[in-house]
Amino acid sequence: MDYTTIPFPSASQDLTIKVPVNHRETVVFEGPIGLRDPTLLKSVLDRLRTIGVKNVVVDFSSFPAECRMDNLAVLEGAIGRMYGFKTRYAGISADKTYFKESSFRDSIAPKIFERLDDAVESFSE
């Protein structure tokens, strides 16, 4: 799948925001996302909502392995629950040993995909 990187003036240098071709309501976040600066994450999500984005895929492949699980919980809460975006995740394992709380595991596991393109395509189903 082809992606277009969109310039986002308020985004940090660590964060890249991409739009998959033919999926205008979906964006992909690559790189650590505002976890060091929650105000940055809020401004990015506010802007995305105003331009009509409904779906967010977070690609964890560039996150340090030791912080992926903690970030998953934080981002699901912020992006999915507080802001109401539909969420998907790639570059992270749905291995049950990572998720100690079964209710979180059961709700998040269907949103995790091995490949980024599969995560994006899942919004079309």
Image: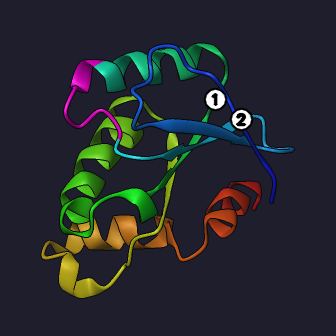
Q: Secondary structure at mark 2?
A: loop
Colour setup of the view: rainbow
| Above/below status of 110 relative to 46 | below
The answer to whether residue 47 is magenta is no
Q: Which residues are magenta?
A: 33-39
For mark 1, what is the residue? 53
Which callout, 1 or 2, points at the residue further toward the start of the chain? 2
Q: How many marks?
A: 2
Residue drawn at (42%, 30%), measured in percent from left and top?
13
Q: Quadrant of the C terminus?
A: bottom right
Left-right relation of 88 to 117: left
Classify residue 115 by image quadrant.
bottom right
Residue drawn at (64%, 40%), measured in percent from left and top?
18
Q: Position of residue 71 (x, y in %)?
A: 25, 52
User: In front here: 24 or 1?
Assistant: 1
Residue drawn at (39%, 71%), measured in percent from left and top?
92
| Above/below status of 91 relative to 82 | below
Left-right relation of 100 to 28: left
Q: Position of residue 87 (x, y in %)?
A: 49, 49
User: In front here: 112 or 8?
Assistant: 8
Instruction: Check if mark 1's residue and mark 2's residue have beta carbons within 8 Å.
Output: yes
For mark 2, what is the residue? 25
**Amino acid type at mark 1:** Val
